[in-house]
């Protein structure tokens, strides 16, 4: 319904000949607790996923636009952290072309885009969710600026989430602060496959509002299998159906835990999802393995620490070897020394980032 809605309501009016301006947004990366793994055509997820947005791991994007009088607009340049990036520029060009049905104005504009990410260059942490979210927010704002609308409300973010999804699935969850749910599930009313939605405040106990995420870099080399390649392997995966059923069970338990402030179950489900994600990779055909020795060393240490101290701390993993240590702010004084003495020695060059749940995206004036 929203696809038809956005296409049918795309603003087809011309743009002023002297249209020119610049729009910038900052948007966070997000870490999934229930994993999106597997998709159908059109960036439709195989299952629902749930994540929270981070505070320090953000991408800033600025989009400069100028009317192209001949109506032959396009992406003129694309810079990442101050440098032209051909590979990403091609992906962005294709992305923008795919959005013409929603933003007909794109054909009439020359664009120059620059992005800057706060993640250390060598950290091996994917910035595409934050980048596509920031770009989608810029596009929605640019459209509003061109047609003199200024409505940064719920509909605005829903549309930005829809557009971000078309760039990278997980990006649709980055347009919100706090917890975001993407995909349909029996266990939450507002779930949609087309965009993410924020969990209602009354559905999360305040203990989860200040979650910490220490990102521990086990290995920063480029991945052998991209996320898109991994998603594709789910199409024929022998465990596909069981995975779909498992997500519903895990999502129910996690949503209940969030509501009830049940830290123990929360940690159990988060770790189960991380190990399942990597289990699915290992049992794909062909199977592959992204965890590194450092990843396993850290997992062992985290589990020992939890058993010895009774502190509810757990790990999750993205499609890569780096550990995200998830813990509660109230435990920070005990967990911090554990991170620096027991985990950081297993990180590549001792690299780690002390991040936490963040305030979501914001419009900014410059990079
Ligand atoms: C393991 O969003 O990067 O991080 O839609 O192909 O761009 P594309 O994939 P992407 O997949 C992310 C997968 C994940 C789990 C998650 O974030 O839910």
Image (cartoon, rainbow, N blue to C red):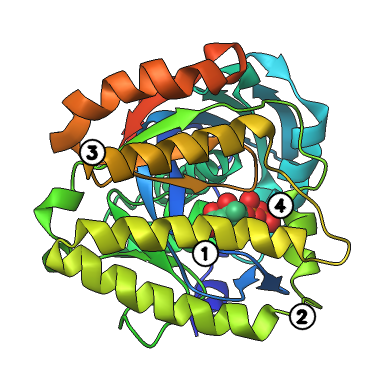
Q: Is residue 185 above or below residue 200?
A: below
> Distance between the Cα atoms at labels 4 and 3?
36 Å
* Image location of residue 186, percent across then percent down: 38, 88
Instruction: Give the residue displayed 35% in from the left and 29% down from the top.
Output: 355
Mark 2 vs mark 3: in front: 3
In the picture, measured across the screen, residue 14 lies left or right of residue 314, that is right
Instruction: Decide which of tag 1 and tag 2 comes sooner along the chain.
Output: 1
- Respond yes or no on whether mark 4 lies under 8 Å from ligand 1: yes
| Disc 2: which residue | 238
Q: Which mark is residue 11?
A: 1
Instruction: Decide which of tag 4 and tag 2 comes sooner along the chain.
Output: 4
In the picture, measured across the screen, residue 33 lies left or right of residue 47, that is left
Instruction: Decide which of tag 4 and tag 3 comes sooner along the chain.
Output: 4
- Dot 3 falls on a residue whose secondary structure is helix
Mark 4 vs mark 3: in front: 3
Instruction: Decide which of tag 1 and tag 3 comes sooner along the chain.
Output: 1
| Disc 3: which residue | 309
């Amino acid at each position: 319904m929203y696809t038809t809605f956005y296409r049918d309501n795309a603003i087809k009016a011309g743009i002023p000949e002297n249209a020119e301006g610049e729009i910038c947004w900052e948007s966070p990366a997000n870490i999934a607790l229930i994993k999106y793994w597997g998709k159908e055509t059109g960036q439709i997820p195989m299952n629902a996923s749930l994540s929270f947005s981070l505070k320090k791991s953000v991408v800033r994007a600025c989009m400069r636009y100028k009317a192209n009088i001949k109506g032959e607009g396009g992406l003129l340049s694309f810079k990442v952290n101050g440098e032209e990036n051909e590979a990403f520029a091609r992906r962005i060009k294709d992305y923008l072309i795919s959005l013409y049905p929603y933003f007909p104005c794109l054909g009439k504009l020359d664009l120059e885009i620059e992005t800057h990410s706060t993640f250390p260059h060598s950290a091996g942490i994917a910035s595409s969710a934050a980048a596509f979210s920031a770009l989608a927010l810029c596009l929605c704002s640019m459209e509003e600026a061109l047609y003199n609308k200024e409505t940064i409300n719920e509909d605005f973010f829903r549309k930005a989430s829809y557009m971000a999804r078309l760039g990278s699935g997980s990006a649709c969850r980055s347009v919100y602060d706090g917890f975001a749910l993407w995909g349909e599930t029996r266990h939450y009313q507002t779930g949609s496959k087309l965009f993410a939605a924020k969990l209602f405040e009354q559905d999360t106990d305040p203990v989860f509002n200040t979650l910490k995420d220490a990102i521990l870099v086990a290995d920063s080399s480029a991945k052998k299998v991209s996320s898109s390649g991994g998603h594709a392997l789910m199409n024929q995966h022998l465990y596909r159906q069981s995975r779909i059923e498992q997500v519903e069970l895990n999502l129910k338990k996690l949503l209940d835990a969030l509501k009830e402030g049940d830290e123990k179950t929360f940690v159990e489900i988060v770790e189960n999802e991380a190990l399942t994600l990597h289990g699915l990779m290992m049992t794909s055909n062909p199977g592959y393995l992204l965890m590194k020795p450092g990843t396993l060393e850290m997992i062992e240490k985290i589990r020992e620490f939890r058993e010895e101290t009774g502190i509810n701390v757990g790990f999750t993993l993205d499609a890569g070897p780096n550990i995200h240590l998830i813990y509660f702010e109230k435990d920070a004084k005990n967990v911090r020394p554990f991170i620096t003495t027991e985990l950081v020695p297993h990180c590549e060059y001792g690299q780690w980032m002390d991040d936490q749940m963040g305030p979501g995206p914001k419009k900014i004036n410059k990079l």
